[in-house]
Image: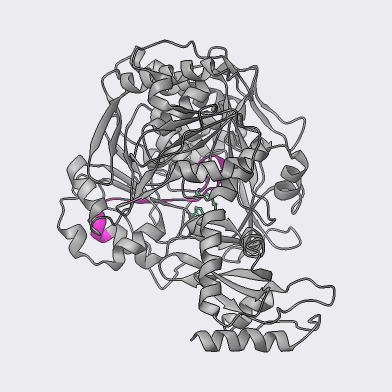
Amino acid sequence: MDIEGEKSVLPTEEVYHPDMNLYKRAYDDSFKNMEAFWSFNAEILTWYKKWDRVLDDTKKPFYRWFVGGKLNMSYNCVDRHIEQHRRNKAAYIWVGEKGDEKIVTYDGLFRRINNLAKALINLGIKKGDRIVLYMPMIIEAPVAMLAAARIGAVFSFVFAGFGAGALAERINDSKAVLLITADGSFRNGKVVELKKIADEALEMTSTIRNVIVVKHAGNNVDMNEDRDIWYHEVVGDSYTYVEPVQMDANDPLFILYTSGTTGKPKGAVHSTGGYGVWVANTLKWAFNPDEDDRWWCAADIGWITGHSYIVFAPLILGLTSIMYEGSITYPEPDRVWEIIEKYRINILYTSPTAIRMLMKFGDKYPKRHDLSTLKVLGTVGEPINPSAWRWYYETIGNSKCPIIDTYWQTETGGFMIAPQRALGLPPLKPGSATFPLPGVDPAILNDRGEEVKDNEKGYIVFRRPWPGMLMTVNNDDERYVKTYFSKFYGYYFCGDYAIKDSDGYYWLLGRADEVLNVAGHRLGTIEVEDALVSTGLAVEAAAFGKPDPIKGEVIVAFIVPKQIQADRRELISEIRKRIRSDLGPIYVPDEIHIVKLLPKTRSGKIMRRVVKAVALDQIPGDLTTLEDSSSVDEIRSAIEAFR
Ligand code: PRX
């Protein structure tokens, strides 16, 4: 199959292994000899006690992996490396937006984790307690994740770009008792005042007993004497050892909230054992990093990509990661290329939005730098269009680095479909994530649940469980079953459209539900609409994603204002401001249009499909259930006025 008339690309012989037999053998083995396959691959971790059973599927779809196994993730990420030969190896090369740098060895990471773990114990945190982390891209972020894991506390990271409302909602749902944050973070040369946002959020919550604050940006903060403590004070500088708690393979490691088709984000609960086995093996299979490679996953640590591939997988494998705080185009659009040259990075893993953004600035920026250390390139988060793929491949990778397009989700824990360098790279086709990883059993179905033919579009599902899958939705087993296993009974429903071509390659085509993908960030349409209405300035709202050449999609919203106001611009700017502070900047619609009424059914349901079609000049489809046809004209005239 060719999209945009692109031909498939064979990477040069240096990296191309035509022998797909290794992959085929591993893939078949993962089903035919499931127990043996996973028993072997689970040895990537160090276990206190081996599992009694690889998979317990007696309570479908609540699958449990490595049942009876005991381990600790902090031990696996650091202790075992310092006991062996990696004590002085860099775990992280941290680079700040101003160009400042910090190298943290495995030993340094170990000390930091232990010291914070001790501080957490002193604050009364016990196994099973929930901790929320609202932190920028600083070393203390992985330290906090691993200190929590060391003592068996369950962390929930909230991306530092979220606003106070979003943070409060996650604290409330997880019933967290402790929050770790920072005074501020750097972004495009400015300071984002995280502690201030956290203070606002804490007014809407009641479970947090203490707040630990990392001094990072140096901005002024209000410290509440009864509640807030400085990180450096609580941790101190002397070193203390904390024995890692032996966790059950199915004790939760973390909860990560993600958007769905309803208003409230879902807390995906990930296990300790299955998740650990999955992320480490998937990184190895897909990217096949060498011991001395420098790995740069340029995601934010607050999203699943950062959790799995900045923290857990690279540390389990004992790699050296780059961690960069700040904007990829600041102070100049060659920031990424400068970092690659300076730190001689071997593998870069980023999003199609970032690639398109950097491509827009032209070749002169990458051409200024020596990128010859690169040997593998990766992408994640959204479909990559072939022209961005080609630019990445040719201009950045000098036509010698395979592009590892990884399809996966917050809920899957790690890669599901991707070329696998360690098992024999297939010829790559720009825009296709190629083949499923071992243990992943995809199918593409139509509305009736039947498999579609090759080259036909349908819903992608996974027919069998895999170790990295979420265990449930926090506090809501029913929602877990309903969201993922009900549309096609018993199969995991991803929510994406896909095609399998006649060569067996998978092409991911974007969301099949009302989930938006803005710059690789997954946002719920209804979350945006709820936020618009809760500004108090709109009585009704409809939002949808409009295709965008750089960000994939941008948010467009139509609102019915509470009061007819003379100055529309002022109203729109006030709405924008309120959404920014409630949910965060990524939720702010690119376009907000004001109308007197929205298309609705006779039963009063807003017809978002119609709003979107009319606004994008498409055919709106069946309008027989429409209550008032003048609403369609309203949308049309609002769009015309905008143009
Ligand atoms: O629509 C798919 C898209 O991102 C969604 C998952 O978003 P999230 O849970 O935030 O995780 C993002 C990072 C793993 C998917 O349902 N998506 C992710 N990777 C790809 C993709 N779409 C196409 N190609 C990809 N490689």
Residue shown at the point (46%, 11%) measured from the top left:
242
Left or right: residue 503 compared with residue 470: left
In the image, residue 244 lies at what x, y percent?
Answer: 50, 14
Left or right: residue 497 compared with residue 425: right
In the image, residue 459 lies at what x, y percent?
Answer: 64, 59
Is residue 40 visible in this depiction of the protein? Answer: no
Residue shown at the point (52%, 24%) measured from the top left:
149
- 586 in relation to 4, above or below: above
In the foreground, 194 or 57 = 194
Is residue 552 visible in this depiction of the protein? Answer: yes
In the image, residue 538 lies at what x, y percent?
Answer: 66, 70
Q: Is residue 401 magenta?
A: yes
So how many labels did they put on this image? Answer: 0
Residue farthest to the right, as pictured: 603
Left or right: residue 309 compared with residue 501: left
Q: Is residue 333 magenta?
A: no
Residue shown at the point (53%, 48%) measured from the top left:
408
- 302 in relation to 248, above or below: below
Q: Which segment is the magenta one?
A: 394-417
- 465 in relation to 327, above or below: above
In the foreground, 207 or 625 = 207
Q: Looking at the rendering, which quadrant does residue 60 occupy?
A: top right
In the image, residue 402 lies at what x, y percent?
Answer: 33, 51
Q: How is the image coloured?
A: one colour
